[in-house]
Amino acid sequence: MIEKKLKRYIYAPETSLHRVLGDLYRKAVTICLVVDSKKKLLGIVTITDLKQAIFKGVDPNTPVHTIMNTTFVSAEVGTSLTKLRRLAMGKTKYKTGIFEKIPILDQHSTLKGLYILPGSQEELRRTVLVTGGAGYVGSHVCRLLLKKGYKVVVLDKLLFGNAGIRDLLKHKNFKLIKGDISNISTLISAVQQADAVIHLAGIVGDPASALNPLHTMEQNHFATKAFIDVCKHYQIARFVFASSCSVYGANPGLLKEESDLRPVSLYAQSKRYSEFVLLREADDNFHPIILRFGTLYGLSPRMRFDLVVNTMTAHAHSRKIIMVDGGGQWRPLLHVEDAAAACVAALETPLQKVSGQIFNVGDTQENYQIQDIAKAVQGHLPGTHIHQQDTVKDRRDYKVSFNKINHRMGWRISRTLTEGIAEIVTTLRKGQFKQWDDKRYNNYLMLRSVLEDIP
Ligand SMILES: NC(=O)c1ccc[n+]([C@@H]2O[C@H](COP(=O)([O-])OP(=O)(O)OC[C@H]3O[C@@H](n4cnc5c(N)ncnc54)[C@H](O)[C@@H]3O)[C@@H](O)[C@H]2O)c1
């Protein structure tokens, strides 16, 4: 059986040049594999071959087999990834100019697979699997990817419904697989359709993660481990992982990627474990990129009102009061759209700059103490009373440096805290999110109700 991913490259010998060229453009692929009815590989044609033939005046209705290259580099089923990589990098006696892709054949020359060199243009521009794509960050990631011309497959169990992606369901380049990342068959079928992964799904936030520790470990850590295995098997080269600056825990100083990790919650601990396994599994064909987001804020098609800035703004708007727990704790803040943009930047930055790397995602100027966030919200909603409590329930306290992502990826934020507060205030004033304290906007409340329903 030919895998779904391979089908986009395959053409019968009689297909016209015109049809193949149009198809390759549409599918954003650069070669066509010409096979007979038994899937025996007869030859290869690149998009350049097709264009040159048509420019030279060859009739566009001519069958593609007339211009195919019958001498090409291929590999036998079972060839190691290291050898495939070497072949793809052009270290062979042939000079056909198609080395970024190596067809994999059995002993009868039947096409069984296609190896694509990680980091090649083709690897960069194809179908991206976004787990948790219906979530607060994911719904922005999907929109950005579609806008840039990617195909998007979302694997999400829709814990909070489909508000985040409802309007994308009819998009020709969008597909939803409603399912759980901890179900291996579902995971495999999603990975088979993808060329790169952005992994966002999981139980998100300290309070939600504390509800059922075993469930949290299963969904956040063990599912990620299995995901890595599946991706390695199906030759997914780029794996962008959403981690969190929460891994720094309660930690003094300006923290860099190599600083000590002192997680104070199971949520952060689960991220730390996953980071460790991802980096341990990195090799020439598997390139994890770890993004440690700051604390997010801002509007999203799947809205959350359980994040510090969003919660304070909603309280100030509707109840004229903000409760501050302690107040001196540092927190780096990041707009949700910037978090999504960082995911796509990690997908597009040349591999040698990002492979196997951890990046704090945010801006060093956007570290705030909790009491300053409350004051910034009060500045937008005058008349708000700030009620400060001395009991510190949330012990997280971290101030983070974001120089690495600025310098290595050339990536910068596009919004600041005050802009984020302003957009939420405007939306609330328009009467949207009247039920902002409903469980659908709160990860802890929603997960608690779901877990209560499980006998
Ligand atoms: N929001 C933040 O402040 C923040 C900060 C740092 C890191 N992150 C990380 O960013 C990622 C996205 O966070 P978010 O704020 O968008 O969270 P979210 O809760 O809004 O979205 C998570 C999505 O994953 C889905 N999901 C959960 N478990 C799943 C499973 N087992 N199988 C399939 N789908 C599942 C949910 O249905 C939801 O759509 C997470 O990995 C989170 O840890 C978020």
Image (cartoon, rainbow, N blue to C red):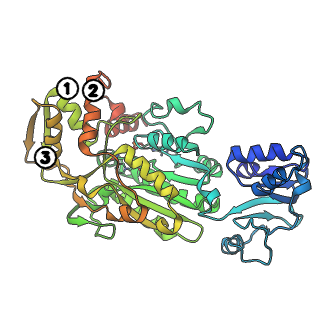
Of 378 and 110, the residue lying toward us = 378
Residue 303 vs residue 30, the one in the foreground: 30
Question: Within 10 Å of the Cα at label 3, are there few (<14), some (14-19), or many (20+) other Cα atoms?
Answer: some
The image shows residue 288 at horizontal and vertical percentages of 50, 63
Q: Quadrant of residue 175?
A: top right
Q: Quadrant of residue 293?
A: bottom left
Identify the residue under disc 2: 428
Mark 3 to mark 2: distance in Å?
22 Å
Taking 262 as reference, is 192 left or right? Answer: right
Q: Is mark 3 within 8 Å of ligand 1?
A: no
Tag 1 residue: 318
Residue occupying image coordinates x 49% and y 54%: 223
Q: Which of the labelled discs sits on residue 371, or is there none? A: 3
Say what amino acid the circle numbered 2 marks. Answer: Leu
Q: Residues within 10 Å of mark 2 (few under 14, many from 20)?
A: some
The answer to which of 81 and 368 lies nearer the viewer is 368
Q: Secondary structure at mark 2?
A: helix
Q: Is residue 54 above or below residue 433?
A: below
**CA gap, disc 1 and disc 3:** 19 Å
Query: As shown in the figure, which amino acid type bears the numbered disc 3?
Result: Gln
Image quadrant in which you'd find residue 317: top left
Residue 55 in picture, x, y percent from top left = 81, 51
Can residue 89 be seen here? The reply is yes
Q: Is residue 201 above or below residue 284?
A: above
The answer to whether the residue labelled 1 contacts the one labelled 3, judged by CB atoms less than 8 Å apart, is: no
Question: 118 or 273: which is nearer to us?
Answer: 118
In the visual, does 432 lie left or right of 75? left
The amino acid type, in three-letter code, at marker 1 is: Ser
Nearest to N terminus: mark 2 or mark 1: 1
Image point 64% across, 62% down: which residue? 233
